[in-house]
Image (cartoon, grey):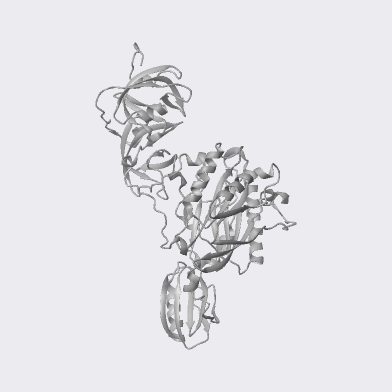
Amino acid sequence: MGQGQTYITIAQARKVAVGKAAYVIGRVTATNQFGSMAYIQDATGGIPVFNTAFANGVSIGDSVKVAGLIASFSSQIQIGSTSSIVDYTKINVPAKAVTPKVISITDAKNYEGQLVTIKDLDFDDKKFVLLPNANYATKNGTNTLEVKINATTNLIGRTKPQSAVTITGIVGLNNTTYQLQPRFTDDLPNTEVYKKPQTGLTAEKSFKLATWNTNWLGNTANGPTGELLQQKNFQQVLDSLKADIFVLEEVSNVKFFKDFISKYTNYKGFCSSAVSAGGVADDAQRVCFVYKKGVVDSVSARSLLTKATPLPNYPDNKPSNFWSSGRLPYLFVADVNINGVKKRLNFVGIHARTNTIGTTATTAEKELQYAQRKYDIGVLKDTLDAQFPTANVILIGDYNDDVDETVSEITSTKESSYKKFIDDTKNYQIVTKSLTDNGVRSYLSQNNVTDHITVSDELVNNYVANSVSTELGFMYIANYSATTSDHLPVYATFNFERDRVLGFEPKFEELAMNVYPNPTKGSITIEVEGNTFDYSLMNFSGNNLIESSGNFSEMNQSINEKLSILPLGMYFLRIQAGEKHGVLKIVKE
C-alpha cells in the first residue's frame, strides 16, 4: 500500500461518506464464510470488506491494513463494492482471533459489523433444515432477532437446534433489520447433518419416482442466466437422484432435451406437446418424462382433457384459460419391472396454474388464479375417477399449491385447491403430505411444498412409508437457486414385492371375501368361505398389526378387537384359506 495515508478507526470509517476513501487497520473476524463479504474489527467497531481476493486471501485472526471506498448495500456500510477496488496488506504479527463480546438480544443494533455471542436463542421454526440465504426468527423471552444462514457457510442443509442455544456470529444489517450471521457449525451448536430416508431396499428391489420443476430449463430469456451451467447442474441432480423415472416441469428447450436424452446413458425420455398458448412453442414450459431403460417400458402417452368442453361456469367465463391456456395434464402409461415383479402404471404429469406472489397482481387476480386452478383440478379428478377407476394412477408434478392449505394470497378461503383429492381418502393418498406436515420446502422462496405425489388406492400398499423426501441440490451445487432451479426435487420409493407379500403370487387362487361397512367406525362384518384361516391385519406401511390363525369366530373377534383401538387410517386385511388368498383395503374414519 502507498505511503502517507491517515488511518482511522473503524468507528470513524463507518461515518465516512459513501464513495469516499477510508484507511483502516483491523483484525479479521470472517473470511469467505460469507462469500466475498469478509469482516474486520478493531476496538471501536466492525465493518464488512466486500472483495473476493481479500475474503479468500486472509484468515480469521489476521491483522490487516485495508484501503477502499465506502459503500452501502441494503443500508449496511461496507468497504468495497462490485465497482471499486480494495487494497490490503497483512501485518506481520501472529494471528489472534477476536473474542466475541457477549451481548443481549436487544443490544444487537449497537454492534453492527462486530463478532458477538448471544445466549439462549430459540428458533421459532424447528422443522426441516437450514436453507441457503434464509432468515430465521429466533427469540429470547419476548425479544426477537433474525438469524441469517448464508449460502456459503457449512451450516446449510443441517437440521435446526431443537431448543435454545448460544449463537456466535457477525451482526449484519439488511435494510432496517439487524441479523446475527453465524459463520460455521461451531458458531451454531446442536445442528446435525440431514439424513435422507433409508428404505432398507436395494435399488434393484425398489422403484424410485421423482418430480422436479427445472425452472425454464434451456430457455435463454427466463430462469438462470447461464444456460450451459444450468444444463450441467441439471444432469448432476439427476445423477445424484438415480430415480427410475423423473417427471419434469418447465423444460423449455426441446432441442436441448432431445440432445440430452440421446447422450444420457441408460435413460430414455420425451416431452408433452401440450403447452400454454401464445409465444414460441419450443420455448414454452412443458412436462417431460425421463425413464430408465430395462425398468420402465413405454406403452403410450397422450394429453388428457383435450375434449373437456364446454367447461360450464369456468371462472371469469374464460374457458380458454383452462389448464394455463393449454398446458394440459400428460398421461404416460408404462410397464414397470422391478426384480421380476411387473406392474402397469399410469403417470399423470401436471404443472398446474401458477400463483402470482406479492404486489404484481391484484387481490381479484389472485382469487381468479386460485379459482381457475381449483376448477382445473376438479375436472381432472372427475376424469380420473371415471376413466381410471381401478387403474394404478400416480398424479405427480408441480401442483402450484400445498395440500394442507392453499399458498394463494387470498382472503376468500384457506382450502387447498386440491381439496377434492384430499377429501377422497378412499381412492387417493397424497404420499408427500408428510413433507408438508414436517415443514419441508420444495419451492425455496416459500415455506411450502408445492410439488407433490398422489397415488390411487391400488398403489397405497406399495408405497414405502416415510420414503418421501426432497433432494438438497444446494448441498453439492454452489448458488443452486440462481444457477439451477428455484425448486427442490421431490421423490418417493415404492416396493412392488409387497404384492407377493400381500398374497398376489400367481400360484394362489383368489379368495372371494368381503367386509362391511367400509369405511368403518371400527367394527366390520367379514364374509368369507372356509373353516380355518391364516390372517393378518397390516397398516399403511405394510407392518403386521395382527398375524394369527384360527376359525372364523376367532378371526372375526381378533380383527374387530384390534380395529376398534386403531387410529383412523387405511389398513389391509389378508386372509388365506387353503390355497386361496385374498386382500381387502379397510378404511377407518
Q: Where's residue 75, x and y in %?
A: 45, 27
Tell which residue pokes out farthest to the left in this image: 94
Residue 487 visible at all: no
Residue 236 visible, this angle: yes
67 up-or-down from 451: above or below: above
Left or right for 205, reference 93: right
Image location (x, y in percent) of residue 53: 40, 27
11 left or right of 375 in image: left
Numbered circles on residues, count: 0
Please tell me which residue is depicted at 32% across the width and 39% down the height of the picture. 187
Quadrant in which the N terminus is drawn: top left
Q: Quadrant of residue 15?
A: top left
Q: From what the image shows, is residue 520 above or below residue 442?
A: below
Q: Which residue is farthest bottom?
A: 531
Q: Residue 107: where, in percent of width, then height?
A: 34, 32
84 shown above or below 285: above
Percent from the top left, x then y, of residue 370?
A: 62, 50
Residue at the spot 32% in from the left edge and 32% down from the top edge = 115
In the rendered image, the residue lying farthest to the right is: 310
- Tell which of 46 and 472 is nearer to you: 472
Q: Quadrant of residue 85?
A: top left
